[in-house]
Image (cartoon, grey):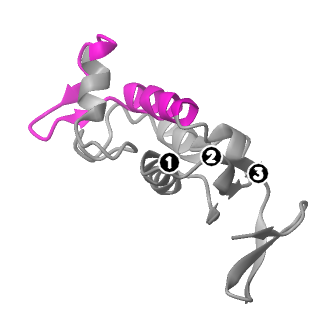
Amino acid sequence: MSWTIIGGGIHAVTIAIKLRASGLAAEDLTIIDPHDSLCEQFDDFSCRIGMPFLRSPHVHHVHPDPFHLKHFAKTNQYTGATYGKYQRPQRDMFMDHVHKMLHEFDLNSRHIKDVATNIDRVDGQWQVDMKAHDTVTS
């Protein structure tokens, strides 16, 4: 069975990684997002406002293992990786982790840079029409 995710932000990437970590083959996944790269909008917005640390604690990130980001920080020797009582992660470290996960789970190759324009249920499957590409069925 193939899966299509519309949108390429943090939540979409988290879902895609969970599917891939659960055994879904890369070729059975499509991510439709109009940006040049996945999580680009989050990266751009959080950088633009000068956010040094995220608002969520370190256990909230894109990998299914809640302590994966903490291990990533330790393995890559980030200093000041988290902030405060709730261990809010450093934004730059968080984005480095996201990019590593995108590559590790081969999500960039599953990204179609486009906009979904319509979704229809046809014969038990979803057909997603896009502005500039053919229809994706999943």
Q: Amino acid at mark 2?
A: Ala
Q: How many marks?
A: 3
Mark 2 neighbour class, 10 Å CA radius: few under 14, some 14 to 19, many 20 or more: some
In the rendered image of this protein, does residue 60 appear above or below residue 92? below
Judge left or right: residue 23 versus residue 55: right
**The C terminus sits in image quarter:** bottom right
Judge left or right: residue 29 versus residue 122: left
- Residue at point 13%, 41% (across, down): 86
Which mark sits nearer the N-terminus, 1 or 2?
1
Any mark on residue 26, and which?
A: 2
In the rendered image of this protein, does residue 7 appear above or below residue 127? above
- Residue interval drawn in magenta: 75-104
Any mark on residue 20, and which?
A: 1
Q: Amino acid at mark 3?
A: Ile
Judge left or right: residue 110 versus residue 86: right
Q: Secondary structure at mark 3?
A: strand
Any mark on residue 112, and which?
A: 3
Residue 84 in magenta? yes
Q: Amino acid at mark 1?
A: Arg
Q: CA distance from mark 1 to mark 3?
A: 17 Å
User: Are the two marked residues, 1 and 2, in contact with CB atoms closer than 8 angstroms?
Assistant: yes
